Amino acid sequence: MSNAEDTNANRAIARNVRIAPRKVRVVVDQVRNKPVEDALEMLEFVQKKAAPVVSRVIDSAVHNVIESDVLDWDPDDLVIAEAFVNEGPTMKRFKPRAMGRATRINKRTSQITVVLQPRN
């Protein structure tokens, strides 16, 4: 973590999301460094499969801050300090091809992480 506080109370992670990481990064790049309410409002209108998933991760991070005994931050004053997507485990499948051959199909998964900070 670069500038986030050293606690897990201000973060949320969604693991093994069945969307390729490069497709999720397009959505996550749009909400990084934005206030939480602006990011959630914007994600309602983004027409990507990853938008509702990223929205749920942000909601989870906000609820983690609210339920935390360590942090006493105002939930209306939070900013998405860090948001990134890592590659999860890849499911490997095979597709039959011509002349008895087979081609490998990689079904990629993502791990989405959101870290919140109070607005300065």
Image: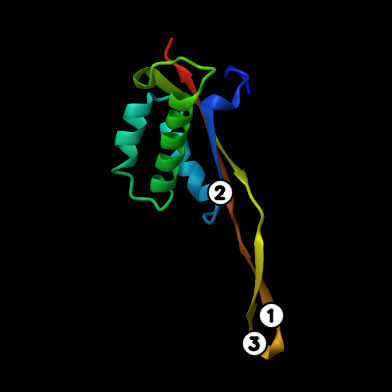
- The relative height of residue 72 versus residue 105 in the rendered view (above or below) is above
* Sooner in the amino-acid sequence: mark 2 or mark 1: 2
> Residue 107's image quarter?
bottom right
Q: Residues within 10 Å of mark 1 (few under 14, many from 20)?
A: few
29 horizontally vs 99: left or right: left
Camera-nearest label, 1 or 3: 1
**x and y percent of residue 102 in the render?**
69, 80
Question: Which mark is on residue 98?
Answer: 3
Camera-nearest label, 2 or 1: 2
Q: CA distance from mark 2 to mark 3?
A: 30 Å
Q: CA distance from mark 1 to mark 3?
A: 8 Å
Q: Quadrant of the N terminus?
A: top right
Which SS class for mark 2? helix
Residue in front for this viewpoint, 66 or 41: 66
Kindly indicate whether the residue at mark 3 contacts the one at mark 2 (C-beta within 8 angstroms): no
Q: Quadrant of the C terminus?
A: top left
Mark 2 residue type: Pro
- Residue shown at the point (41%, 53%) measured from the top left: 49
Asked if one can make out residue 82 in the rendered structure from this viewpoint, the answer is no
Residue at label 1? 102
Which SS class for mark 1? strand
- Residue shown at the point (43%, 31%) measured from the top left: 63
Asked if one can make out residue 75 in the rendered structure from this viewpoint, the answer is yes
**x and y percent of residue 13 in the render?**
55, 39
Which SS class for mark 3? helix
Residue at label 2? 21
- Residue shown at the point (58%, 17%) measured from the top left: 5
108 horizontally vs 45: left or right: right
For this orientation, the residue located farthest to the front is 69
* Sooner in the amino-acid sequence: mark 2 or mark 3: 2
